[in-house]
Image (tube, helix red, strand yellow):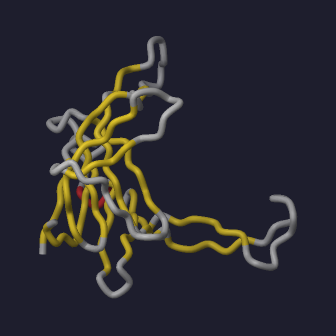
Amino acid sequence: GKAFDHVTLNFFYRGQAEADKITFTYDPATNLLLRKQDGYTFKTRMPSTASGKSPKTANYHVQDLTVQNLIVQHVSYRDIAGDAKGRRNAELTGTGRCEYFVNGKYMTGTWARPSYEEPTTYLLDGGEVVTLEPGRTWIAMHPDNAEESPVNVTYR
């Protein structure tokens, strides 16, 4: 793959400032991707090791969301009939394009999921199964309409 350092996901964000879009920035020192949204580092809440047994008694610490692997899975979206807020449904069966960001490398390929009872298969353009690094993986279900929602990658 090609070395990259920044990914911007333009998820239906027409006319929005670059800082307000979803971004992932690669840090080669940690081999992790840092997620930002609307210009802010995306946070996650994790239970501490001395946590209580239920969500009401658990102790949490907040940390920046980092992931080891990013998969951008291009899927078809359609409007939900009668939904006044303009929400959309994503079609998660079938096949489509994929973009992979693993170990500071950008690769392309395809995904396939014949039915909801079967797992999704992720392949590189050459037909090989994608090898992910151990750790968190973020799968972004991204519109397959590249004109409406392009994925921008900054290369080193």
Give the image location of residue 42, x and y in percent.
47, 64
Image quarter hosting the N terminus: bottom left
Taking the view exactly as shown, the residue that stands out farthest to the bottom is 29
Image quarter hosting the C terminus: bottom left
Taking the view exactly as shown, the residue that stands out farthest to the top is 82
Q: Is residue 12 visible?
A: no
**Image quadrant assignment for residue 39:** bottom left
For the point 27% across and 49% down, the residue is 123
Q: Is residue 146 above or below residue 139?
A: above
Q: Is residue 120 visible?
A: yes
For the point 81% across and 67% down, the residue is 58
Give the image location of residue 27, x and y in percent.
32, 79
Q: Is residue 121 above or below residue 30?
A: above
Given residues 67 and 40, the one toward you in this image is 67
Q: Decide if residue 121 is on the left or right side of residue 63.
A: left
Give the image location of residue 89, x and y in percent.
43, 26
Given residues 97 and 29, the one toward you in this image is 97
Q: Decide if residue 116 is on the left or right side of residue 156.
A: right
Taking the view exactly as shown, the residue that stands out farthest to the front is 128
Q: Decide if residue 47 is on the left or right side of residue 87.
A: right
**Image quadrant assignment for residue 23:** bottom left
Number of on-image labels: 0
For the point 35% across and 79% down, the residue is 31
Given residues 135 and 115, the one toward you in this image is 115
For the point 49% across and 34% down, the residue is 118
Q: Decide if residue 8 is on the left or right side of residue 137.
A: left
Give the image location of residue 28, x and y in percent.
29, 82
